[in-house]
Image: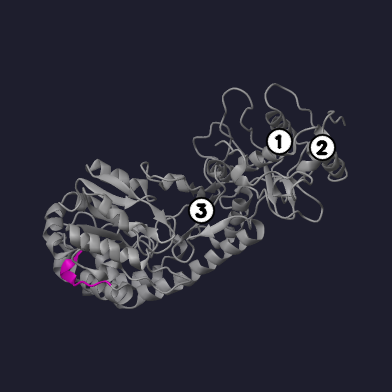
Amino acid sequence: MRVDAGVDAGVNVWVDSAEALGSDLHLELAGAGSRRAALMAALRDAIRGGRLAPGTRLPPYRSLAADLGLARNTVADAYAELVAEGWLTARQGSGTRVAPRADPPPPSRRTERAQPTQPTQPTKLTQPTKPPTPPSEGGARRAPARPAEPVHNLLQGQPDAASFPRAAWLASARRALTAAPNEAFGPGDPHGRPELRRALADYLARVRGVRTDAGRIVVCSGYAHALRLLAGTGALRGRAAVEAYGLGFHRSLLAAAGVRTVPLPLDADGARTEELDSHPGVRTVLLTPAHQFPTGGPLHARRRAAAVDWARARGGLVLEDDYDGEFRYDRRPVGAVQGLDPDHVLYVGSVSKSLSPALRLGWMVLPDRLVDEVLAVKGDREGWVSALDQLTLADFIESGGYDRHIRRMRQRYRRRRDQLVATLAEHAPHIRVSGVAAGLHAVLELPRGTERSAVRAAAWQGLALEGLADYRHPDAEGPHRDGLVVGYATPPDHSFAGALDALCRALPPDLAGPADSAGPAGPADSADSAGSAGAPPPAATRPPVSG
């Protein structure tokens, strides 16, 4: 190997050291473009052609850099981008290897060419003989081929459908039908069945600290329905403050109703409600105080009080979305903000997370002044929620079945959460997990500039999940947070471990972690001390991987 003249002694030291480590790998770097692009193309060709089989360990990046006469950072960057694209994996103690692939699901009916039949829910990860065709190196980039449908669903917001309490729900339905008055089978009351509103008033007071009576509860089909109803009243008009991260669907719904949303910054204590005074045209603020969606964490007591004080002084309204308040694991229950001031806080809840979104059952706990306005918008008859489902839920609550189900599912989701955290601690200790003290999802915080590539790598691994950027308000100020929003409630038990394994393969590698005993191994290696065999700089200082 030739070393150019004028290179200092320090470089000769790391070259000599690198040549003594690792293994041989024949690669021909041809074609126009940068040396990193040529190296990535050569590695893709070797993997695509089967010369580098799944599971093959690549040489440490220092060793390969010395063999090819490249800069260490050039090889480290190439490894990192191929990991993000799903061609390679990098783990502590295992080095950088050619990635396996998840079993694809059966082809869709729209597939033009017949494919071999595969199991619908594979229970393990296998290695195909030939990876899908990757993006071309020159010209237009083509999306990597991948299964038409994901193998594993890690999307947030979905409970475990297999755990729906079918037998208990059926028993409540039978009792409710037997006891239902004849008028329950006529046109529905837009206020909601009185049996359900009484049951909810008692339950919410006991469990969530809500202060209400049955007359102030209006049954709806969920939070989106509640927003539509409020948009038809004077409660949601003009401008409304929202959290800087939240569901874009809700913002679009408000925009369609002529409501302009103003983002409130977020930090570790939740939305910065003390900044509401700086928005003079705002009369309503939408919050997720029990468990900020999607970043996690409760709204600090100081900021809860600030929101209520602002609403009192401004004559405004706090709209509280209690979307998963029952599911908390590592902290004491966080009560509803509504309990601080029922006249200025409107509370919305549903069974979408606790039971199933298929039921389309929710409720609004309204200030007295808004009850008649909301009922006027809703109309003369109930057109959204089945009276029979309302009666069944009322019995389910009053019989204790709802409490028993919540407590059982809390334990189940806690175990899922613990498994996710333990797997990441073992295989991706450089990834910080947040928002896991409550709810059905976690946020995996990523190095800056890696989110889009991680989402793309997850899709390549057969995972359905989303990045934090999908939830960011378009007008939010401050730096973007890179992260993945990972739901852990939905996958069946038999495939959850496989889903986590695929997730770990999709994560960006640790470019500054400890080296394994066999020597450095590409992006999974540690950074050496200054002046020694060159490690790449920290992730924050490296060029972002393109998405």
Q: Residues within 10 Å of mark 3 (few under 14, many from 20)?
A: many
Q: Is residue 215 magenta?
A: yes
Q: Are marks 2 and 1 in contact (CB under 8 Å)?
A: no
The part of the image, by quadrant, that contains residue 363 is bottom left
Q: Which disc is residue 74 wearing?
A: 1
Magenta-drawn segment: 210-218
In the structure shown, which secondary structural element does the residue marked by tag 3 occupy? loop
Nearer to us in this view, 171 or 38: 38
Q: Identify the residue at horizontal 68%, vertical 27% (top origin).
A: 34
Q: Which disc is residue 154 wearing?
A: 3
Among the two numbered marks 2 and 3 on one chain, the one whose residue lies closer to the N terminus? 2
Residue type highlighted by circle 2: Ala
Q: Position of residue 291 (x, y in %)?
A: 40, 62
Nearer to us in this view, 430 or 502: 430
212 in relation to 57, above or below: below
Quarter of the image with the C terminus is top right
Among the two numbered marks 1 and 3 on one chain, the one whose residue lies closer to the N terminus? 1
Q: Is residue 117 visible?
A: no
- Which residue does the numbered mark 2 point to in the structure image? 66
Q: Identify the residue at horizontal 24%, vertical 63% (top origin).
A: 309
In the structure shown, which secondary structural element does the residue marked by tag 2 occupy? helix
Q: Residues within 10 Å of mark 2 (few under 14, many from 20)?
A: many
30 in relation to 460, above or below: above
